[in-house]
Image (spheres, helix red, strand yellow):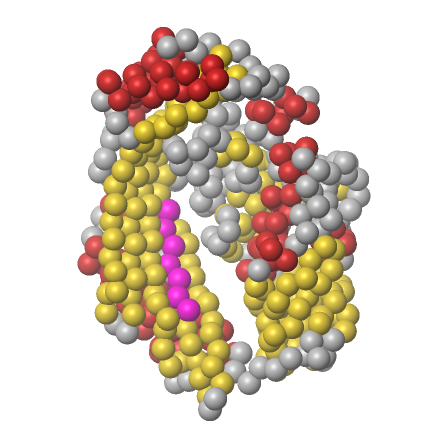
Amino acid sequence: MSGEGPADLAAAAGRAVEAAVSAGASDAEVWAESTREREVRVHAGEVESLTQATGHGIGVRAWIGARTGYAYGTDLSDEGIRQLGAGAAELAGLADEDEHAGPADPGGDPATVEGLRDPEISAWSAERVVELAKAVERGALDEDDRVSSVEQAVYVDVDGRVALATSLRDEPLGYEASSCYAYTQAMAGAADDRQTGLGFGVGRSPASLDPEVIGREAGAEAVSMLGSSKPASRSCPAVLADTVAASFAGFVGGALCADSIQRGRSPFAGRLGQELASTALVLTDDGLDPDGLSSAPFDGEGTPCRRTPLIEGGRLLAYLHDTYTARREGASPTGNAFRSSYRSAPSVSTSNLVVKPGAGTLEELVAEAEAGVFVTDVAGLHSGVNPVTGQFSVGASGRLIKGGELAEPVREFTIAGDLVELLASIRSCGGHSRWIPFGGSVKTPPLLVAELAIGGT
């Protein structure tokens, strides 16, 4: 990839640590990154936009005792780095003391994760990724004559390098990673009825994506919703599509981050070690899965990433920690300090959330449900869930289940309940799972829930 090379980033990070310490910091930590991002948007067979941007920057976190300061910038010259180091140290001198503040312990060698970067990503020209996006659109239109148009077909990729240096390490750490995804939303029509459907794919390079499959998924989903109506209100079994299951899993993962726990803004606060979920559910935060787009050898503080079982055997086994929350609780960091970019200090976040698949197909889950609803989409989950109590009520769409088979489509209904009770009511997990890139990195199969409240007519 273009931009700062590994040696350049590592050297810049090391100089920034020295600059902060020279300016009076007792300790310092520097995150340096270089990225190339590309996005293509296609509509009606024509390119609506094609953007490519490269950039680099560093973020300096400095401590003076128990006080912390943070500064960031893009000037990697000697003077630019000197000013950033001095700025972070100056801000630390002005900050309030916090007994839990301080740099992460070195914590051992970084983990080994193979295949984080696919070199193929740099071999694909702009023309090739444009053709991929166009193929996604064609796939949706070719799926069914009732697919009238595609809102947009979008392709995005990121190719990046990272270096991290601290005053507690002799040598900087570093790694390279790539990621890409493509998606489209198809529109199908019959008479006055118009419905939409989503298709997507995710990988390390465009070579790992199948544009026709992505497009056809969107087209098929849109067509499947034609003729939909509101279902009757009731409580019934529900099968959650993988995308819907991923949304709930993502919310659960966020609620298991220790900062939420310690602020009392989680339904899982004070429940460590308790039985609260079905034994059918096995949920893990896995920062080492080679296919997970949030995998890395180390987190945003240099702590080695790891695999952390969260829920297994029905019990809540762990919370996710960075150095700060671990010190506050007297626990150990779990390698879950992550950064959105060099512009911000790290905070606790999930890496890759993985729901262990079961043995059944989607058809077998539907058959096991016998009667109820197959939920294929939810709207506004994060605004529709009370982060303290776990109570939720969100809009949904999907298909009715009758006699153990999928029946007519339904929309404009709500699903409501309690998040912890939902985990306890999971009856079965499907046997096929996939990565869902929206709202985090989650891998999950569809889930069968024994009972869910449906609000319709």
Viewer-proximal residue among 195 and 393: 393
Q: Is residue 211 visible?
A: yes
Name the residue rendered at 73%, 49% in the picture. 389
Considering every residue shown, the one lying at the far right of the view is: 275
**Among the 4 quarters of the image, the one containing residue 329:** top right
- The image position of residue 253, as x and y in percent, is 61, 44
Above or below, 98 relative to 366: above
Question: Which quadrant: the N terminus?
Answer: top left
Question: Which quadrant: the C terminus?
Answer: bottom right
Above or below, 276 relative to 371: above
Give the residues drawn in magenta, as a range.
179-185
- The image position of residue 370, as x and y in percent, is 73, 74
Viewer-proximal residue among 290 and 58: 58
Magenta stretch contains residue 182: yes
Viewer-proximal residue among 68 and 16: 68
Q: Is residue 29 visible?
A: no
Q: Chief secondary structure of the magenta span?
A: strand
Apparent side of residue 312 relative to residue 409 in the rendered image (left or right):
right
Name the residue rendered at 47%, 45% in the picture. 292
Considering every residue shown, the one lying at the far front of the view is: 94
